[in-house]
Structures are given as C-alpha cells and as structure tokens.
Image (cartoon, helix red, strand yellow):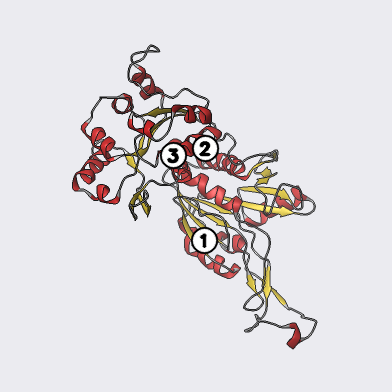
Amino acid sequence: MASADAPRPPWQGRRIVLGVTGGIAAYKSVTLARRLTRLGAEVDVVLSRSSREFVTPLTFEAVTGRPVLTDLFSVDGAARHIRLGREADVVCIAPATADFIARAAQGRANELLTTTLLVTRTPVLLCPAMNDRMWAHPQVQANAGHCRERLGYHQLGPVAGPLAVGEGDGPGRMVEPEVIVEHLGRLLGGGGILEGRTVLVTSGPTREPLDPVRYLGNRSSGRMGFALAAAAWRRGAHVTVVTGPSALPRPEGVEVVPVETAREMDAAVRDRVGEADVIVYAAAVADFRPVRAEERKRKRSRDGEGWAVELTANPDIASGTKEHRKPGSVTVGFALESEDLLSNAADKRERKGFDLVVANPAGEPDAGFEAETNRVTLLGSGKPEELPLLPKEAVAEMVLDRVEALLRGRV
C-alpha cells in the first residue's frame, strides 16, 4: 500500500538541519524528525546541551538513520558548522527557547547551533515554545522581532494551548509537527512559477437536502482536492478551496470556503474564478437535486412505505463559469467514469474548456472515493499519460507539475 508519507517533493532529497533546544516541547521534535525523514529529507539533528535533559541523541538517530550532532568541535572535523550551514536547504529550530532566541538575535557563536545560523544563507524557521509569561516579556518579544525583521528568519507560533503541568494554558505552546512539516514544505517548494499566483480549487462532495436529516450526495472525502490545495500552497501560491462537507483536516495556509449544496458551490466559484490564475475543478458535485426538500423529517410511520422524489439538474459549475475565467488561466478538471474512460474524459475536456483532465475509473480498489490513493490518466493536448497507483498527495504534485508547464508556455 502506497503511503502519504512516502518520499515526495518538496522534501525528497533535501537537507534539513533540525535544531532542538532545551524545552519540554523537545519530545515533539522526534515526531517532526521522523515525518521529515519518511518524506525523503536528509535530517541533520543538532541537539543543544540543555535539550539532552529532555531527549537523547539515540532517539533521533533511530528515526532519522543519521548521526546526531551535539558539539561544535569534534574529531570528525573542526568546522562542521560550516558544512551544516552550507549544505542545508532549510534550518528549523523546534523548539526555540527564550534563551536560544536571545542568543540568535545577538549573533552569538558559543555552540554548534548558533554558529550554524551565522554560516547559513538558507531560510531559517523558528518555532518558539515557552511559558506564556516568558513569551510575553518585552525583551523576548524584542529578540523575536529582531530575528524576523533584521535577520529575515521566519517564525511559526507559538500557539495558545496547554503548557507544561502546572503552567495552565496560554500562548506559548509549540505548533504541532504536522504544521511545521507543511511550512518547511513551503520554504522548500516556493520560488517557481506558482509563487504569488492565485489558485482556486473545488473539493469534496455536495449535499442536496431531501428533508432536515437526509440528503443526496456521494462518498467523496475531499482528499484529492485538499491535496491539490496544499501542494499549490507549498509552491508559494495564494490558494482558496471551495469545499463541500469533509471530515479531513483543513489544508495549512489555505483559505477554506465551506459550502453544502451545488448551488452554493457555484455561487462561491463565480465570485472568485475571475481572479484565479489556476482553477482546479476537483469537487464531486451532485448532478441532480430534489425539486422540493421536505420541511420536516419524513417518517415511514406517518407517510407510508414509499417515497417518490422528483429530481432536477444542478448547475454545471465548470461550464457555467467558463466565460468568467481569467484570460490565460490554466484550468484542470476531473473525470470519474464507469465506462469508456479516455473517450468520455476527452469529450469532457473539450466541452468544458479544460487544459488538463485527470481521469480515473470508478469502482477500482484503492482508488477514487474514500481512498488515500488514486490511479489516474492525465489528458492534455498530447498523448494520454497513465500514472501508477499513487498516494493522492503524489498525484497532486504530478498534476501541478503539468500545470506549471502550461503556465510557463503562456508567459
């Protein structure tokens, strides 16, 4: 079974220096190091002296498969900070304590991690974690501000939540590892043609009410649309996803516009499609809706054994918004077909003015609705491109590679 944490861009093959300083949140950094490694990054963990009171080098070596670095000088090479700083694609300090932020702001070079910061010219991400009163102290705020404004470091968090036992709740908690992973992905994945562009994605199912408790819909989870939105955001785009009901976590950094019915989705897309450089119609929109929704729950004991429901067509969102698209924009559609996959998908591409169609067969195991993986064929102006069974996150990256190629051809 393919995994969403399998190696993939933008983490795959990249060098990440993960600095861990002495706070209780250091235990979360083990999960962070493991996730980055599973995504294909080479993670060099640097532990400060105080961090080793909370976590051990052996733990990080077990999850990264790489030696953990602790000393500025060693028999392996006196200038290891030079190598770390030069070879890193990004440096992340998680957690970043008040003491470390102060030393970073001062440009200190009294241990391996601060010295590495002086050498590197790659993006630096600070993830502060401390007691909320410490974080609120004017000097801590000044030091953090200096790191952001003068040194150009990126800061993520802290967030409000439970602190160490006995410290209550407050703004001082380190952000969760999965959020840090996404922000590191944006630092690694930006700089391409999607940087600064506007991307609009539709996602998930729509629900058409029959009565106050029942609806017509489908089994779409929204995973494919969310994966596309997240991947576009990591590439530096400004992303809006218009989504039907979904139980999945919202993509990090993405504006989410929740809707329920096809008509609500149509209105939301019409309001935004004219500003989008890329439009991805990934939602599984219900083609029909009841002519009339019951005002109260229909009960068999009261209304009998049968229920005839008259249906009417919903708006075709892709076709209906075709004339409102921004000139030069790239448009992607999806085609889920139970027969004649390629011919039906090609016809859909022509009728709806799509630059690219992502076609997948209905009913295949481990693909389509409610699955974490998908097996698709990409149809553009050339020969159809059949992809193997892949995690939907990997499919999203490959679709956006083709979108970027189309955008370059229009510059």
Residue 156: x and y, percent?
36, 45
Amino acid at pointer 3 = Tyr
Quadrant of the rendering where the N terminus is positioned? top right
Category of crowding for the residue at label 1, using alpha-carbon neighbours closer than 10 angstroms: few (below 14), some (14–19), many (at least 20)? some
Q: CA distance from mark 3 to mark 1?
A: 50 Å
Q: Quadrant of residue 221?
A: bottom right
Category of crowding for the residue at label 2, using alpha-carbon neighbours closer than 10 angstroms: few (below 14), some (14–19), many (at least 20)? some
Q: Is residue 368 left or right of residue 279?
A: right
Q: Which residue is mark 1?
A: 324
- Mark 1: secondary structure: helix
Q: Which residue is mark 2?
A: 35
Q: Is residue 366 left or right of residue 278?
A: right
Mark 3 vs mark 2: in front: 3
N-terminal-most mark, 3 or 1? 3
Q: CA distance from mark 3 to mark 2?
A: 14 Å
Amino acid at pointer 2 = Arg
Amino acid at pointer 1 = His
Q: Which residue is mark 3?
A: 27
N-terminal-most mark, 2 or 1? 2
